[in-house]
Amino acid sequence: MSAGRRLKQRMQEKKYLFTPGITTALHAMMVEKAGYDYVYTGGYDASLTLLGLPDVGLMTETEMVANLRNIARATSLPVMADADTGYGNAINVIRTVQNYEAAGLAAMHIEDQVSPKRCGHVAGKVVIPLDEAVGKIRAALDARCDKDFLIIARTDAVAAAGAGFDDAVKRGKAFARAGADMVWAEFPSADPDYPKRYAQEIHREFPGLPLYFNYSSNLKWYESGVKFEELADMGYKMMHVSLVAMRVMMQAFWDYAVDMKALVADAEIDFQKRLVGHPMGAFHELAGFPKVKERESKYLPAEELKKKYDGAVGL
């Protein structure tokens, strides 16, 4: 069963799917161990984590695909990923879809910003003409080999210069008519009531169409109190909380680095004490060392195993 088919099957089995946004293969392994149904990788996370650069279209398709290939290999979960603008026009989109699908992904989303794009939650966004955006979605659909590979059409028109909510609705309907598997309208705002209000309006405009929701990392959103279950009732079938692994890592590592600067070795001693009994304390097991040893026992000569392990210290 293909990755796309497995993702669709999970969507059919459950009212909705949700997951934390991740960046690396290690994060994907942790998401799977925690019991989620799919993996989501965003462009902002990847650009900042892997390149140390802001999400303004600086990360190339080649760099993104290399990371996604590692992620898909590291987990048995279906993987969905950000494809920005498709990294060019409709012709570039064709290659992007082929490469994302060949990397082992289950789904991807393409946005309707001009290239180079920028994060959907910062100022300066401009969207391309609607007919060009629809052409890119059509090209994406035609390019996939597996018809279960999901093409999710995202519009950033809500907060783009010269556009707005009505334009976003118009674009979403055009993407749906073109055959997009899901529609995603991005709702950036500092207004805590904004996500719930506009999510409801989008739901009314797209009855019966599966919708995707980005539960933004913008702190104001959480003041709205909108819950996953409420979004599912509005027709949102899949959703992720953006930038989770990156933000958690930034906070945790910053705190550790500050502690070590002040406490020196005591910081590491205290940290190790907190790891005792924690699921991530046994990181050698998560990394797969026991499986390596099992395979060595199956395939390597007995004499070689004896040399490697007799009297050896460690796992």
Image (tube, rainbow, N blue to C red):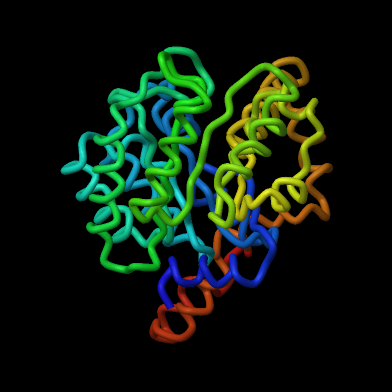
Taking the spot 23% from the left edge, 50% from the top edge, the residue there is: 139
Pick the quarter of the image with the C terminus.
bottom right
Q: Is residue 314 in view from this perspective?
A: no
Question: 92 or 173: which is nearer to us?
Answer: 173
In the image, residue 252 above or below residue 33: above
Taking the spot 31% from the left edge, 33% from the top edge, the residue there is: 130
Taking the spot 47% from the left edge, 79% from the top edge, the residue there is: 295
* Image coordinates for residue 188, horizontal then vertical, percent: 58, 24
Taking the spot 77% from the left edge, 20% from the top edge, the residue there is: 263
* Image coordinates for residue 32, horizontal then vertical, percent: 61, 60
Report whether 93 appears left or right of 17. Answer: left
Question: 73 or 242: which is nearer to us?
Answer: 242
* Image coordinates for residue 154, horizontal then vertical, percent: 44, 39
Question: Residue 204's image quarter?
Answer: top right
Report whether 91 appears left or right of 131. Answer: left
Question: 283 or 115: which is nearer to us?
Answer: 115
